[in-house]
Amino acid sequence: MIKSFKLNDGVEIPGIGLGTWQSSKEDAYNATLSALKNGYRLIDTALAYQNEDAVGKAIKDSLIPREEIFVTTKLPAQYKSYDEAIKYANESLANLGLDYIDLYLIHAPWPWSEVGKDCEKENIEVWKAFIDLKKEGKVRSIGVSNFRPSNIKNIVDATGVVPSVNQIRFFIGNTQEEVTKYCQDNNILVEAYSPLGTGEILNASELDNVAKKYNKSKAQICIRYCIERNTLPLPKSVHEERIIANLDVDFKIDQGDIDYLSTLTIGSRRPLRS
Ligand code: A2P
C-alpha cells in the first residue's frame, strides 16, 4: 500500500494516481476503469485533455463510492479571469458528472500559446475564484501546476492562501530542484506528472543496474523514485498490465541509489505541456 499524503488544508490524498494526459476518451474510460478496479483511488484529468466525461463515466461505472475516489482536474491555462475560473469549474463538474472536485488546479501560470507571459495580476483573480469555489464546497482542495516559486509567492502574498499542490513535470533527470525544494519547504505537495518522462527515459541504460538490483522494471524504479522524493507520481498508461505494474511499487530504494539517480541528466528538459 502506498502511503497517502495529508495536504496543508487537512485533506487526505492517495500517494499515487493515474495520469490521463494524451489519452483519448475511449482510452481514458478504459484506463480509469481498469485503474480503479486494480486499486488506484486517484485519477488526474484536465478540461484541456478533453476526456473528463470519459473519466467521470468510468468512475460511475466502477460502482466504487464517490467519496473513496479522489478526482483532480484543471482550469485551462488560457482562462485568466475570476468569471472564467468559475464558469469552467462548473463545466468540468458537468463533464465529470460530479457534485464536487477533490483537487482543482490552475493548469499553468500562462497560456500555453504564450509560455512565460506575465499573468501575475490575472492569476490573483483566478486564485480568488478558486478560494471561493473551495468555500462553496465545489472543490475540496486547490492548487497550481507548472508554477515557479515567484508565481506561487504572487498569489499567496495577495490572498494569504497557500496552494495545497504544485503539479510539475518531475522525473529522474528532470527534478526541478529549485521548485521542488521551495514547495516542500512550504508544505506544498509536489505532484509528479510525466514520472516516466512521457516514456522517454525508459530507454535510458543508466537505469539498468538499479532496476536489476531491485528486480523491478525501469518504469517501477522511476515511479518509486518519485515516492522516495516525497512527490506524488501520476504515471499515465492505457494498458492494463502496465497500469497494474505501475502501482506495484511498494519497495524501498536505498538512499545511495536515490542520490545516484538524482545526479542523472536523462530525458528531455523542455517544458512539455501536461
Ligand atoms: P501507454 O499509455 O501506451 O502504456 P508518463 O507517465 O511519464 O507521461 O509516461 C507515459 C508513457 O509511458 C506512455 O507512452 C505510456 O504508454 C508509457 N508507459 C506507461 N507505463 C509504462 C510501463 N510500465 N512500461 C512501459 N511504458 C509505460
Image: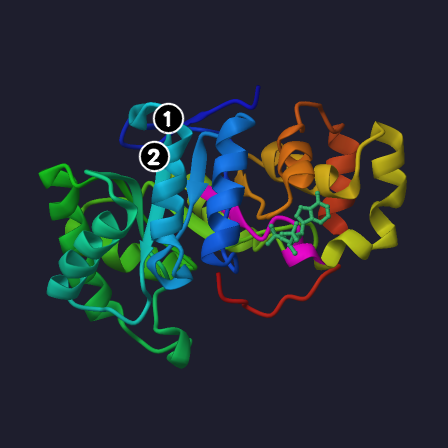
Compared to residue 230, the image places residue 104 above or below, namely: below
Indicate the position of residue 46 as horizontal and vertical percent values.
37, 55
Indicate the position of residue 221 as horizontal and vertical percent values.
73, 38
Which residue occupies 48% across, 40% down?
A: 32
| Region of the chain picked out in magenta, as a range | 190-199
Q: Which residue is mark 1?
A: 63
Question: Dot 1: what SS?
Answer: loop
Which residue occupies 22% across, 48% down?
A: 93
Question: Dot 2: what SS?
Answer: helix
Instruction: Identify which amino acid the numbered label 2 is placed on.
Output: Lys
Residue 60 marker: 2
Compared to residue 201, the image places residue 262 above or below, namely: above
Q: From the viewer's perspective, is 79 left or right of 47? A: left
Quarter placement of the N terminus: top right
Which residue occupies 41% across, 50% down?
A: 45
The Cα–Cα distance between marks 2 and 1, rounded to whole angstroms, is: 6 Å
Indicate the position of residue 47 as horizontal and vertical percent values.
33, 59
Q: From the viewer's perspective, is 7 left or right of 167? A: left
Instruction: Identify which amino acid the numbered label 1 is placed on.
Output: Leu
Tag 2 near tag 1, CB within 8 Å: yes
